[in-house]
Structures are given as structure tokens and as C-alpha cells.
Image: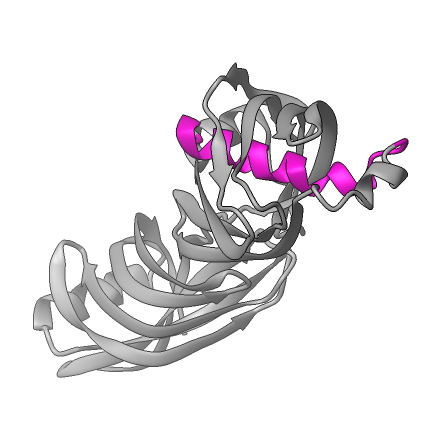
Amino acid sequence: MTNLKSTRLMTLVLSLGALTACEGWEDFELDPYLPKVRFDSLEVIDVDWDGVQADFIFQVDNPNPIDVSLDRFDYALAFEQVEWLSGDSPEGLVLAAEDASELALPVEIEFEGLFDMVQAVRGQDDIGFGLDGSFGFDTPVGPLDIPYDEDGGFPAPRRPNFKLNKLKLKDISLAGADLNLRVDVDNDHGSNLFFQNVDYQISLAGIDVGGGFIDSLGEVDGATSKTVNVPISIDSVELVTALYSVLQGDKLEVDFEADMDVDTPFGVVPLHVNDLREIGIER
């Protein structure tokens, strides 16, 4: 859930940023006492599959020879037109006199509760937000209460899904076997995902066969699934015997666990996957 204090700050400055767009204030916009606020950028500080921490960066300019206070505001924040939270606060923000500065407003979103309420759409990277309300701006020429209404997209990472498909036999003898573990990877985003630095461990029929490191599993296009290969080499007589049995039509319990880096539209995000299931084998 969004940190309340951060949300208040975000609401306050977003509202000020909407001031110059409000109808009926064209003449007042030219008033030399009016501070100026310009949205500069959205900087993602930290992102994982559970949530996002980001800073809304604004450039603030107060041309007044005295301090100016922002003392009143109310807000309503919605995602995909479903209200997430709302409220008001008497807390204010003071802008230094005759000063230009950068203002960073932190926002934290945890996805578990959010996605229970509104589902991110397959094939999109962001989830739509709407923010509206009003704020009280105290100036040397008197108080102003200005409405605002903002909307846009907020990063919405969704965890890629890994599902064991089957074992593909490359070579087998009484001494050992080489196989490929075929894994289906589903990408829910609109952008392509790149899977790299894959450190994995595998067990077959409850027996640890070790693991390995793969520089890259390749790229999975947006809103698609792709099957990737993970190599396995075994030298266990017990497992070779089990593989011969599986070739007769049985299934084998496979446990796949891996850590990797995923290059996403929001930056590189670490991912841990683990899938355990019974699968077949083919030559």
C-alpha cells in the first residue's frame, strides 16, 4: 500500500504542477508572486516483483522575496479507475524565498494488494493511475484553492512464469546421459524481457544432479511464451536406470530452481524461480 506521507507529498506537488493549466488563471499566472513548479522526471529507485519505489522529480521556483506556504490539500488516488486511497491533511510545504530547487517526492507501491483489486493488462508495462483533488496555496496576494486532475502510467512489473515442459534426451548409455530440460517462460508485459546470468540447480527423482551457469536464456517477446533449454548431464547409474523406465512411458519428478537477472523496461530485476512437477521424456 502506498506510504501515506509519500502520497500526501506527491499529491501536493502534482497539484501545484497543474496550476498553470487551470482555466481562468491566465492573468494570475503572470503575477510575479506566483511560484512555478515543473515536473522533470520519474526516477525508479528500486523495483522488484513485489513493488516499486520511485521519486517524482520536480523543479520548484519561488520568485517571492519571502517564504510562501502550501497549507491545504485533499487527494484521491485511483488505479484503473478504482479508488485506492483518499484523504486530506493540514500539513504544509514551505518553499524558500527567491530560490530554485529540485524536489524529490518518494512513492512506494506494493503490488500484492493492488493486483488483488485491479489486474494489470497483459501486453502492457504500466498500470493507469488517476490523481485529483485541490490544494491551498498561500501567496502574498492572498490564499488560493486550486483544483487538479492528473493521470498517467505507473510501472507495474509482473513476475514471469516458469513451467517445466519436458526432458529432451540427447544421449544415453549405461555410464550416463545428456539431456535438455525444456522450460516454458511466459512474459505478461508489453516489452520484451531478457533472461541472463542464470545460476541453476536440478534434481531428478529426488536425486541432486547438480547445476550450472548460463550467460543468457535469450529474449522472450512481450505478451508471448517461449520454450528455453537448460542442459543436464548425469553420471548416476540409478538415474540412468530411471531414465530408461521413463522412456517406456512413465514420468519423472523434476525439481528446477534458479536465480537470474531479468532485463525489464524498469531496469534489471533479480528473479528466483522454483518449479517441481512430474514430466515426460522424449528422444
**Residue at the location (52% across, 47% down)?**
97
Residue at the extreme front of the image, as rendered: 65
The colouring scheme, among rainbow, by chain, secondary structure or one colour, is one colour
Quadrant that contains the N terminus: top left
Residue 3, horizontal then vertical, whole percent: 40, 31
Q: Please check the rendered image and state whether residue 62 is part of the magenta-colored stretch, yes or no.
A: no
**Residue at the location (22% across, 76% down)?**
212
Q: Which residues are magenta?
A: 2-24
Residue 46, horizontal then vertical, whole percent: 38, 54
Residue 11, horizontal then vertical, whole percent: 57, 32
Give the tally of numbered discs: 0
**Residue at the location (49% across, 18% down)?**
89
Q: Can residue 129 be seen by looking at this rendering?
A: no
Q: Most prominent secondary structure in the magenta stretch?
A: helix
| In the foreground, 166 or 143 | 143
- The reply, left or right, for residue 27 in relation to residue 149 is right
| In the foreground, 187 or 230 | 187
